[in-house]
Image (spheres, grey):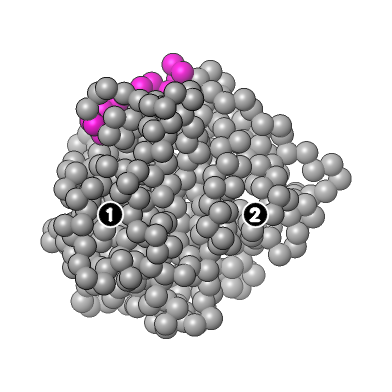
Amino acid sequence: MNRRDALKLSAVGTTSLLLTQHPMANMLNLGPLTLREAFGRDFKFGVATAAYQIEGAWNLDGKGPSIWDTFSHKKGKILNGDNGDVSCDFYHNFSQDLALLQSMNMDVFRFSTAWSRIMPEGQGPLNIKGIDFYHRVIDRCLALSIEPWLTCYHWDLPQALQDEGGWFNRDSIAWFSDFVEVLAKYYGDKVKHWMVFNEPMAFTGLGYMSGGHAPGIRSFKQFKAAVHHVTVAQGEGGRILKELLPDAIVGTTFSCTAVEPKSNAPRHQKAAKKADALFNRLFIEPAMGMGYPTEDLSMIQGIERWVKDGDMERATFDFDFIGLQNYFRSVARFSFWPPVFWANLVKANKLTKEENITEMGWEVSPEGMYHVLKQFGEYGKRIIVTENGAAFEDHVEGNFVHDSRRLDFYKQYIGQVLRAKREGIPIDGYFAWTFLDNFEWAEGYHPRFGIVHVDFENQERLIKDSGLWFKEQLR
Protein backbone atom coordinates (compact mmCIF):
# COMPACT_ATOMS: atom_id res chain seq x y z
CA MET A 1 0.00 0.00 0.00
CA ASN A 2 1.39 3.46 -0.84
CA ARG A 3 0.98 6.80 0.90
CA ARG A 4 -1.71 8.11 -1.40
CA ASP A 5 -3.72 4.90 -1.15
CA ALA A 6 -3.33 4.64 2.63
CA LEU A 7 -4.95 8.06 2.74
CA LYS A 8 -7.57 7.09 0.16
CA LEU A 9 -8.69 4.32 2.49
CA SER A 10 -8.63 6.63 5.49
CA ALA A 11 -12.39 7.18 5.79
CA VAL A 12 -14.27 4.39 7.50
CA GLY A 13 -17.93 5.37 7.61
CA THR A 14 -17.77 8.38 9.88
CA THR A 15 -14.20 7.54 10.78
CA SER A 16 -10.98 9.05 9.53
CA LEU A 17 -7.54 7.64 10.20
CA LEU A 18 -4.60 9.89 10.97
CA LEU A 19 -0.96 8.84 10.83
CA THR A 20 0.46 10.72 13.80
CA GLN A 21 3.62 10.80 15.82
CA HIS A 22 4.35 8.03 18.23
CA PRO A 23 7.30 8.00 20.65
CA MET A 24 10.23 6.13 19.13
CA ALA A 25 10.96 2.76 20.68
CA ASN A 26 14.44 1.97 21.90
CA MET A 27 16.86 0.53 19.39
CA LEU A 28 17.37 -3.22 19.30
CA ASN A 29 20.09 -3.82 21.88
CA LEU A 30 21.35 -7.37 21.60
CA GLY A 31 24.50 -6.85 23.62
CA PRO A 32 26.90 -9.66 22.67
CA LEU A 33 24.10 -11.65 20.99
CA THR A 34 23.44 -11.81 17.26
CA LEU A 35 19.93 -12.06 15.81
CA ARG A 36 20.49 -15.80 15.43
CA GLU A 37 21.31 -16.15 19.11
CA ALA A 38 18.60 -13.80 20.37
CA PHE A 39 15.76 -15.41 18.40
CA GLY A 40 16.98 -19.01 18.41
CA ARG A 41 18.26 -21.24 15.65
CA ASP A 42 14.79 -22.39 14.59
CA PHE A 43 13.57 -18.84 13.93
CA LYS A 44 13.45 -18.09 10.18
CA PHE A 45 14.84 -14.89 8.70
CA GLY A 46 14.20 -14.08 5.07
CA VAL A 47 13.01 -11.62 2.47
CA ALA A 48 9.63 -11.16 0.79
CA THR A 49 9.00 -10.32 -2.87
CA ALA A 50 6.13 -10.27 -5.39
CA ALA A 51 6.14 -11.48 -8.98
CA TYR A 52 4.90 -8.32 -10.70
CA GLN A 53 7.19 -6.11 -8.67
CA ILE A 54 10.45 -7.83 -9.61
CA GLU A 55 10.10 -10.20 -12.56
CA GLY A 56 9.73 -7.98 -15.60
CA ALA A 57 9.42 -10.05 -18.82
CA TRP A 58 5.78 -8.98 -18.82
CA ASN A 59 4.98 -10.40 -22.27
CA LEU A 60 7.74 -12.98 -22.84
CA ASP A 61 7.57 -16.75 -23.26
CA GLY A 62 3.81 -17.02 -23.45
CA LYS A 63 2.86 -14.91 -20.43
CA GLY A 64 -0.57 -13.33 -20.67
CA PRO A 65 -1.36 -9.81 -19.44
CA SER A 66 -2.33 -9.24 -15.82
CA ILE A 67 -4.45 -6.45 -14.39
CA TRP A 68 -1.22 -4.70 -13.35
CA ASP A 69 0.14 -4.83 -16.90
CA THR A 70 -3.07 -3.15 -18.05
CA PHE A 71 -3.32 -0.69 -15.16
CA SER A 72 0.31 0.46 -15.26
CA HIS A 73 0.07 1.13 -18.99
CA LYS A 74 -2.78 3.59 -18.47
CA LYS A 75 -1.82 7.23 -18.39
CA GLY A 76 -1.81 8.85 -14.98
CA LYS A 77 -2.17 5.68 -12.91
CA ILE A 78 1.48 5.26 -11.82
CA LEU A 79 3.82 7.94 -10.50
CA ASN A 80 6.15 9.22 -13.24
CA GLY A 81 4.44 6.97 -15.79
CA ASP A 82 6.41 3.93 -14.56
CA ASN A 83 5.42 0.31 -15.15
CA GLY A 84 6.66 -3.17 -14.30
CA ASP A 85 7.58 -4.23 -17.82
CA VAL A 86 11.25 -4.73 -16.89
CA SER A 87 11.62 -3.80 -13.20
CA CYS A 88 14.51 -5.82 -11.69
CA ASP A 89 14.36 -8.32 -14.58
CA PHE A 90 14.38 -11.12 -12.01
CA TYR A 91 13.06 -13.35 -14.80
CA HIS A 92 16.55 -13.33 -16.32
CA ASN A 93 18.60 -12.50 -13.20
CA PHE A 94 17.10 -14.89 -10.64
CA SER A 95 20.12 -17.18 -10.45
CA GLN A 96 22.55 -14.38 -9.53
CA ASP A 97 19.99 -12.71 -7.28
CA LEU A 98 19.42 -15.85 -5.25
CA ALA A 99 23.16 -16.36 -4.91
CA LEU A 100 23.32 -12.81 -3.56
CA LEU A 101 20.57 -13.66 -1.09
CA GLN A 102 22.52 -16.71 0.04
CA SER A 103 25.58 -14.53 0.62
CA MET A 104 23.44 -12.50 3.05
CA ASN A 105 22.84 -15.64 5.15
CA MET A 106 19.05 -15.50 4.75
CA ASP A 107 17.00 -18.65 5.38
CA VAL A 108 13.92 -17.93 3.28
CA PHE A 109 13.00 -16.52 -0.11
CA ARG A 110 9.31 -15.61 -0.13
CA PHE A 111 8.03 -15.15 -3.68
CA SER A 112 4.78 -15.27 -5.62
CA THR A 113 3.78 -16.88 -8.88
CA ALA A 114 2.38 -14.73 -11.68
CA TRP A 115 -0.96 -16.39 -12.43
CA SER A 116 -0.94 -15.27 -16.08
CA ARG A 117 2.59 -16.61 -16.59
CA ILE A 118 1.33 -20.08 -15.71
CA MET A 119 -2.21 -19.78 -17.09
CA PRO A 120 -2.18 -16.93 -19.66
CA GLU A 121 -5.99 -16.73 -19.79
CA GLY A 122 -6.41 -17.40 -16.08
CA GLN A 123 -8.01 -20.76 -16.81
CA GLY A 124 -7.61 -23.41 -19.48
CA PRO A 125 -4.30 -24.21 -21.18
CA LEU A 126 -1.08 -24.04 -19.18
CA ASN A 127 2.05 -22.22 -20.29
CA ILE A 128 4.86 -24.75 -19.94
CA LYS A 129 7.57 -22.09 -20.16
CA GLY A 130 5.98 -20.25 -17.25
CA ILE A 131 5.72 -23.42 -15.19
CA ASP A 132 9.35 -24.20 -15.97
CA PHE A 133 10.48 -20.74 -14.84
CA TYR A 134 9.23 -21.28 -11.29
CA HIS A 135 10.74 -24.77 -11.27
CA ARG A 136 14.10 -23.16 -12.00
CA VAL A 137 13.61 -20.55 -9.27
CA ILE A 138 12.65 -23.20 -6.72
CA ASP A 139 15.48 -25.55 -7.77
CA ARG A 140 17.98 -22.70 -7.47
CA CYS A 141 16.73 -21.92 -3.96
CA LEU A 142 17.07 -25.53 -2.90
CA ALA A 143 20.54 -25.82 -4.41
CA LEU A 144 21.58 -22.81 -2.32
CA SER A 145 19.93 -24.16 0.86
CA ILE A 146 17.34 -21.36 0.79
CA GLU A 147 13.77 -22.32 1.69
CA PRO A 148 11.26 -21.31 -1.03
CA TRP A 149 8.03 -19.99 0.53
CA LEU A 150 5.41 -19.63 -2.19
CA THR A 151 2.58 -17.08 -2.20
CA CYS A 152 -0.16 -18.25 -4.55
CA TYR A 153 -1.61 -14.80 -5.27
CA HIS A 154 0.04 -11.41 -4.87
CA TRP A 155 -2.38 -9.04 -6.63
CA ASP A 156 -1.74 -9.81 -10.34
CA LEU A 157 -5.04 -11.32 -11.53
CA PRO A 158 -4.98 -12.32 -15.23
CA GLN A 159 -6.60 -9.60 -17.31
CA ALA A 160 -8.72 -12.22 -19.08
CA LEU A 161 -10.42 -12.97 -15.76
CA GLN A 162 -10.89 -9.31 -14.94
CA ASP A 163 -12.65 -8.98 -18.29
CA GLU A 164 -15.19 -11.40 -16.84
CA GLY A 165 -15.61 -9.37 -13.66
CA GLY A 166 -12.54 -10.38 -11.67
CA TRP A 167 -13.12 -10.91 -7.96
CA PHE A 168 -16.61 -9.36 -8.33
CA ASN A 169 -17.58 -12.51 -10.25
CA ARG A 170 -18.45 -15.46 -8.01
CA ASP A 171 -16.71 -17.74 -10.53
CA SER A 172 -13.45 -16.27 -9.19
CA ILE A 173 -13.64 -18.80 -6.33
CA ALA A 174 -13.48 -21.66 -8.84
CA TRP A 175 -10.86 -19.93 -11.00
CA PHE A 176 -8.57 -19.49 -8.02
CA SER A 177 -9.19 -23.01 -6.75
CA ASP A 178 -8.12 -24.43 -10.11
CA PHE A 179 -4.98 -22.27 -10.08
CA VAL A 180 -4.01 -23.41 -6.59
CA GLU A 181 -4.49 -27.01 -7.68
CA VAL A 182 -2.08 -26.44 -10.57
CA LEU A 183 0.51 -24.93 -8.23
CA ALA A 184 0.21 -27.82 -5.79
CA LYS A 185 0.53 -30.36 -8.61
CA TYR A 186 3.66 -28.86 -10.15
CA TYR A 187 5.53 -27.54 -7.09
CA GLY A 188 4.20 -29.46 -4.12
CA ASP A 189 7.02 -31.98 -4.07
CA LYS A 190 9.55 -29.16 -3.63
CA VAL A 191 7.78 -26.36 -1.77
CA LYS A 192 6.86 -27.04 1.86
CA HIS A 193 5.64 -23.59 2.94
CA TRP A 194 2.66 -21.93 1.24
CA MET A 195 0.72 -18.69 1.58
CA VAL A 196 -2.69 -18.45 -0.09
CA PHE A 197 -3.11 -14.68 -0.42
CA ASN A 198 -1.08 -11.56 0.13
CA GLU A 199 -3.05 -8.89 2.00
CA PRO A 200 -6.65 -9.44 0.84
CA MET A 201 -7.77 -6.18 2.46
CA ALA A 202 -5.27 -4.25 0.37
CA PHE A 203 -6.07 -5.73 -3.04
CA THR A 204 -9.84 -5.65 -2.54
CA GLY A 205 -9.93 -2.21 -0.90
CA LEU A 206 -7.48 -0.50 -3.22
CA GLY A 207 -8.55 -2.40 -6.33
CA TYR A 208 -12.34 -2.35 -6.00
CA MET A 209 -13.17 0.48 -3.59
CA SER A 210 -10.65 3.32 -3.79
CA GLY A 211 -9.54 2.56 -7.36
CA GLY A 212 -5.93 3.45 -6.56
CA HIS A 213 -4.65 0.01 -7.55
CA ALA A 214 -5.48 -2.41 -10.35
CA PRO A 215 -8.10 -2.95 -11.63
CA GLY A 216 -8.96 0.64 -10.64
CA ILE A 217 -12.63 0.22 -9.69
CA ARG A 218 -14.51 2.52 -7.28
CA SER A 219 -17.60 0.71 -6.08
CA PHE A 220 -18.91 -0.26 -2.64
CA LYS A 221 -20.97 -2.96 -4.32
CA GLN A 222 -18.02 -4.51 -6.09
CA PHE A 223 -15.87 -4.17 -2.99
CA LYS A 224 -18.30 -6.11 -0.81
CA ALA A 225 -18.73 -8.83 -3.42
CA ALA A 226 -14.96 -9.08 -3.88
CA VAL A 227 -14.46 -9.30 -0.10
CA HIS A 228 -16.79 -12.26 0.12
CA HIS A 229 -15.45 -14.11 -2.90
CA VAL A 230 -11.86 -13.63 -1.75
CA THR A 231 -12.79 -14.76 1.77
CA VAL A 232 -14.28 -18.01 0.46
CA ALA A 233 -11.38 -18.47 -1.99
CA GLN A 234 -8.94 -18.02 0.90
CA GLY A 235 -10.45 -20.96 2.79
CA GLU A 236 -10.79 -23.07 -0.34
CA GLY A 237 -7.18 -22.39 -1.33
CA GLY A 238 -5.91 -23.53 2.04
CA ARG A 239 -8.10 -26.62 1.96
CA ILE A 240 -6.92 -27.63 -1.52
CA LEU A 241 -3.28 -27.29 -0.54
CA LYS A 242 -3.76 -29.43 2.57
CA GLU A 243 -5.76 -32.07 0.71
CA LEU A 244 -3.17 -32.40 -2.05
CA LEU A 245 -0.12 -31.79 0.14
CA PRO A 246 -0.87 -33.18 3.63
CA ASP A 247 2.62 -32.39 4.91
CA ALA A 248 2.66 -28.80 3.63
CA ILE A 249 2.71 -25.88 6.06
CA VAL A 250 -0.06 -23.56 4.88
CA GLY A 251 -0.80 -19.97 5.90
CA THR A 252 -2.03 -16.72 4.45
CA THR A 253 -1.02 -13.11 5.07
CA PHE A 254 -2.81 -10.05 6.43
CA SER A 255 -1.90 -6.38 6.40
CA CYS A 256 -2.26 -5.08 9.95
CA THR A 257 -2.15 -1.72 11.66
CA ALA A 258 -2.28 -0.93 15.36
CA VAL A 259 -5.35 1.31 15.68
CA GLU A 260 -5.62 3.81 18.51
CA PRO A 261 -8.39 6.36 19.21
CA LYS A 262 -7.44 10.02 19.04
CA SER A 263 -8.62 10.33 22.64
CA ASN A 264 -10.71 8.44 25.18
CA ALA A 265 -13.85 10.19 23.96
CA PRO A 266 -16.51 7.55 23.11
CA ARG A 267 -16.87 8.83 19.53
CA HIS A 268 -13.16 8.34 18.85
CA GLN A 269 -13.14 4.93 20.52
CA LYS A 270 -16.03 3.86 18.30
CA ALA A 271 -14.12 5.13 15.27
CA ALA A 272 -11.10 3.06 16.29
CA LYS A 273 -13.26 -0.04 16.65
CA LYS A 274 -14.57 0.44 13.11
CA ALA A 275 -11.09 0.95 11.73
CA ASP A 276 -9.80 -2.14 13.51
CA ALA A 277 -12.67 -4.21 12.09
CA LEU A 278 -11.89 -3.05 8.55
CA PHE A 279 -8.11 -3.18 8.51
CA ASN A 280 -7.38 -6.03 10.92
CA ARG A 281 -10.37 -8.32 11.37
CA LEU A 282 -12.33 -8.40 8.11
CA PHE A 283 -10.57 -11.40 6.57
CA ILE A 284 -9.05 -13.29 9.48
CA GLU A 285 -12.22 -13.67 11.53
CA PRO A 286 -14.17 -15.52 8.81
CA ALA A 287 -11.18 -17.85 8.42
CA MET A 288 -11.36 -18.51 12.17
CA GLY A 289 -15.07 -19.37 11.92
CA MET A 290 -16.14 -16.11 13.55
CA GLY A 291 -17.95 -14.63 10.55
CA TYR A 292 -17.70 -11.04 9.33
CA PRO A 293 -17.37 -8.24 11.92
CA THR A 294 -20.55 -6.56 10.65
CA GLU A 295 -21.59 -5.42 14.12
CA ASP A 296 -18.52 -3.18 14.33
CA LEU A 297 -18.35 -2.31 10.63
CA SER A 298 -21.63 -1.04 9.25
CA MET A 299 -20.15 -0.37 5.81
CA ILE A 300 -20.12 -4.10 5.00
CA GLN A 301 -23.68 -4.69 6.11
CA GLY A 302 -25.49 -6.12 3.12
CA ILE A 303 -22.61 -8.44 2.27
CA GLU A 304 -25.14 -11.23 2.92
CA ARG A 305 -26.40 -10.58 -0.61
CA TRP A 306 -23.41 -12.49 -1.94
CA VAL A 307 -23.33 -15.23 0.72
CA LYS A 308 -24.73 -18.59 -0.39
CA ASP A 309 -25.47 -21.67 1.69
CA GLY A 310 -22.28 -23.25 2.95
CA ASP A 311 -20.06 -20.29 2.09
CA MET A 312 -19.02 -19.42 5.63
CA GLU A 313 -18.11 -23.05 6.28
CA ARG A 314 -15.99 -23.00 3.12
CA ALA A 315 -14.36 -19.75 4.29
CA THR A 316 -13.29 -21.36 7.56
CA PHE A 317 -9.90 -23.04 7.49
CA ASP A 318 -7.41 -24.06 10.16
CA PHE A 319 -4.29 -22.34 8.83
CA ASP A 320 -0.95 -23.53 10.19
CA PHE A 321 0.25 -19.95 10.60
CA ILE A 322 -0.79 -16.33 10.23
CA GLY A 323 1.39 -14.13 8.04
CA LEU A 324 1.39 -10.71 9.73
CA GLN A 325 2.47 -7.62 7.77
CA ASN A 326 2.90 -4.28 9.48
CA TYR A 327 4.44 -0.96 8.50
CA PHE A 328 2.75 1.81 10.53
CA ARG A 329 0.04 2.45 13.11
CA SER A 330 -3.18 4.46 12.70
CA VAL A 331 -4.96 6.90 14.97
CA ALA A 332 -8.73 7.02 14.47
CA ARG A 333 -11.00 9.98 15.07
CA PHE A 334 -14.70 10.60 14.61
CA SER A 335 -15.66 12.68 11.59
CA PHE A 336 -18.95 14.15 10.38
CA TRP A 337 -17.83 13.85 6.78
CA PRO A 338 -19.61 11.22 4.65
CA PRO A 339 -17.57 8.14 3.62
CA VAL A 340 -15.49 9.38 0.70
CA PHE A 341 -12.98 6.54 0.55
CA TRP A 342 -10.84 7.91 -2.23
CA ALA A 343 -10.43 11.44 -0.87
CA ASN A 344 -7.15 12.74 0.52
CA LEU A 345 -8.52 13.54 3.96
CA VAL A 346 -5.29 14.24 5.80
CA LYS A 347 -1.68 14.97 5.08
CA ALA A 348 0.42 12.75 7.30
CA ASN A 349 3.52 14.91 7.05
CA LYS A 350 1.64 17.80 8.62
CA LEU A 351 0.80 15.67 11.63
CA THR A 352 4.10 13.96 12.21
CA LYS A 353 7.64 15.22 12.40
CA GLU A 354 9.39 14.80 9.08
CA GLU A 355 12.25 12.77 10.56
CA ASN A 356 9.73 10.19 11.74
CA ILE A 357 8.17 9.65 8.30
CA THR A 358 9.21 7.28 5.52
CA GLU A 359 9.20 8.19 1.83
CA MET A 360 5.74 6.62 1.62
CA GLY A 361 4.46 9.17 4.13
CA TRP A 362 4.14 6.49 6.79
CA GLU A 363 4.94 7.03 10.44
CA VAL A 364 7.79 5.02 11.93
CA SER A 365 6.00 3.38 14.86
CA PRO A 366 7.80 0.31 16.23
CA GLU A 367 5.39 0.03 19.16
CA GLY A 368 2.65 -0.54 16.60
CA MET A 369 4.36 -3.77 15.55
CA TYR A 370 4.37 -4.94 19.15
CA HIS A 371 0.69 -4.15 19.60
CA VAL A 372 -0.50 -5.95 16.46
CA LEU A 373 1.59 -8.99 17.38
CA LYS A 374 -0.07 -9.03 20.79
CA GLN A 375 -3.50 -8.57 19.20
CA PHE A 376 -3.07 -11.33 16.61
CA GLY A 377 -1.46 -13.56 19.20
CA GLU A 378 -4.88 -13.81 20.81
CA TYR A 379 -6.07 -15.92 17.87
CA GLY A 380 -3.84 -18.71 19.16
CA LYS A 381 -2.01 -19.27 15.88
CA ARG A 382 1.66 -19.46 15.07
CA ILE A 383 2.77 -16.11 13.57
CA ILE A 384 5.31 -15.30 10.88
CA VAL A 385 6.08 -11.63 10.21
CA THR A 386 5.89 -12.06 6.44
CA GLU A 387 6.53 -8.39 5.59
CA ASN A 388 8.08 -5.41 7.35
CA GLY A 389 10.32 -2.69 5.96
CA ALA A 390 10.66 0.96 4.98
CA ALA A 391 11.37 3.24 2.04
CA PHE A 392 14.05 5.85 2.64
CA GLU A 393 16.44 7.74 0.42
CA ASP A 394 19.67 5.83 -0.20
CA HIS A 395 23.12 7.41 -0.46
CA VAL A 396 25.25 5.65 -3.08
CA GLU A 397 28.98 6.22 -2.73
CA GLY A 398 30.98 4.09 -5.14
CA ASN A 399 30.32 0.46 -4.24
CA PHE A 400 28.60 1.34 -0.98
CA VAL A 401 24.96 2.22 -0.33
CA HIS A 402 24.35 3.92 2.99
CA ASP A 403 20.82 3.67 4.37
CA SER A 404 21.13 4.47 8.05
CA ARG A 405 17.46 5.34 8.49
CA ARG A 406 16.36 1.98 7.09
CA LEU A 407 18.86 0.20 9.31
CA ASP A 408 17.53 2.08 12.34
CA PHE A 409 14.00 1.13 11.28
CA TYR A 410 14.86 -2.58 11.19
CA LYS A 411 16.58 -2.46 14.56
CA GLN A 412 13.56 -0.77 16.14
CA TYR A 413 10.91 -3.02 14.62
CA ILE A 414 12.83 -6.26 15.11
CA GLY A 415 13.34 -5.17 18.70
CA GLN A 416 9.57 -5.09 19.14
CA VAL A 417 9.23 -8.51 17.50
CA LEU A 418 11.76 -9.87 20.00
CA ARG A 419 9.89 -8.18 22.84
CA ALA A 420 6.62 -9.86 21.83
CA LYS A 421 8.33 -13.22 21.34
CA ARG A 422 9.91 -13.05 24.79
CA GLU A 423 6.46 -12.37 26.22
CA GLY A 424 5.23 -15.66 24.83
CA ILE A 425 3.69 -14.72 21.45
CA PRO A 426 4.43 -17.70 19.13
CA ILE A 427 6.44 -15.84 16.47
CA ASP A 428 8.61 -18.11 14.33
CA GLY A 429 9.92 -15.91 11.53
CA TYR A 430 10.63 -12.43 10.19
CA PHE A 431 10.85 -11.50 6.48
CA ALA A 432 12.14 -8.11 5.38
CA TRP A 433 10.23 -6.17 2.75
CA THR A 434 12.01 -6.31 0.51
CA PHE A 435 14.96 -8.04 -1.10
CA LEU A 436 15.51 -5.76 -4.12
CA ASP A 437 14.44 -2.21 -4.85
CA ASN A 438 11.45 -2.78 -7.10
CA PHE A 439 8.28 -1.49 -8.74
CA GLU A 440 6.31 -0.20 -5.77
CA TRP A 441 2.81 -0.37 -7.28
CA ALA A 442 1.19 3.06 -7.80
CA GLU A 443 4.35 4.81 -6.54
CA GLY A 444 6.49 3.34 -9.33
CA TYR A 445 10.25 3.26 -8.78
CA HIS A 446 10.59 6.33 -6.57
CA PRO A 447 10.34 4.70 -3.13
CA ARG A 448 13.08 2.15 -2.48
CA PHE A 449 12.36 -0.60 0.04
CA GLY A 450 15.16 -3.00 -0.83
CA ILE A 451 18.05 -4.10 1.34
CA VAL A 452 19.77 -4.49 -2.03
CA HIS A 453 20.08 -1.42 -4.27
CA VAL A 454 19.11 -1.85 -7.92
CA ASP A 455 20.31 0.45 -10.69
CA PHE A 456 17.35 0.18 -13.05
CA GLU A 457 19.41 1.48 -15.98
CA ASN A 458 22.04 -1.27 -15.95
CA GLN A 459 20.49 -3.81 -13.51
CA GLU A 460 23.52 -3.72 -11.19
CA ARG A 461 22.98 -4.76 -7.57
CA LEU A 462 24.69 -3.45 -4.44
CA ILE A 463 23.98 -4.71 -0.93
CA LYS A 464 23.04 -1.75 1.26
CA ASP A 465 24.30 -1.18 4.78
CA SER A 466 21.03 -2.65 6.08
CA GLY A 467 21.61 -5.79 4.04
CA LEU A 468 25.18 -6.05 5.29
CA TRP A 469 23.86 -5.75 8.85
CA PHE A 470 21.56 -8.72 8.27
CA LYS A 471 24.46 -10.62 6.71
CA GLU A 472 26.62 -10.06 9.78
CA GLN A 473 23.81 -10.78 12.25
CA LEU A 474 22.78 -14.02 10.53
CA ARG A 475 26.19 -15.63 10.12
Q: Does the magenta stretch include residue 171?
A: no
- Name the spot of residue 450 as percent of width and height, x first: 53, 44
207 or 189, nearer to the observer: 207
The residue at the far left in this view is 164
What residue lies at 20% left-to-right and 37% top-to-bottom?
Answer: 75
Q: Which of 101 and 368 is in front in this view?
A: 368
Specify the segment rendered in magenta: 339-351
User: Mark 1 near mark 2, Cβ–Cβ under 8 Å?
Assistant: no
User: Which residue position is annotated with label 1?
Assistant: 227
Residue tagged 2: 425
| Image quadrant in which you'd find residue 456 | top left
Can you say whether 330 is above or below 464 in the image?
above
The location of residue 102, given as percent across then percent down, is 64, 60
Q: Is 143 or 341 nearer to us in this picture? A: 341
Give how far across and how far down residue 277 sits, in percent.
38, 44
Q: How crowded is mark 2: few (under 14 residues within 10 Å), some or many (20 or more)?
A: many
Q: Main secondary structure of the magenta part?
A: loop
State whether residue 139 appears in this view. no
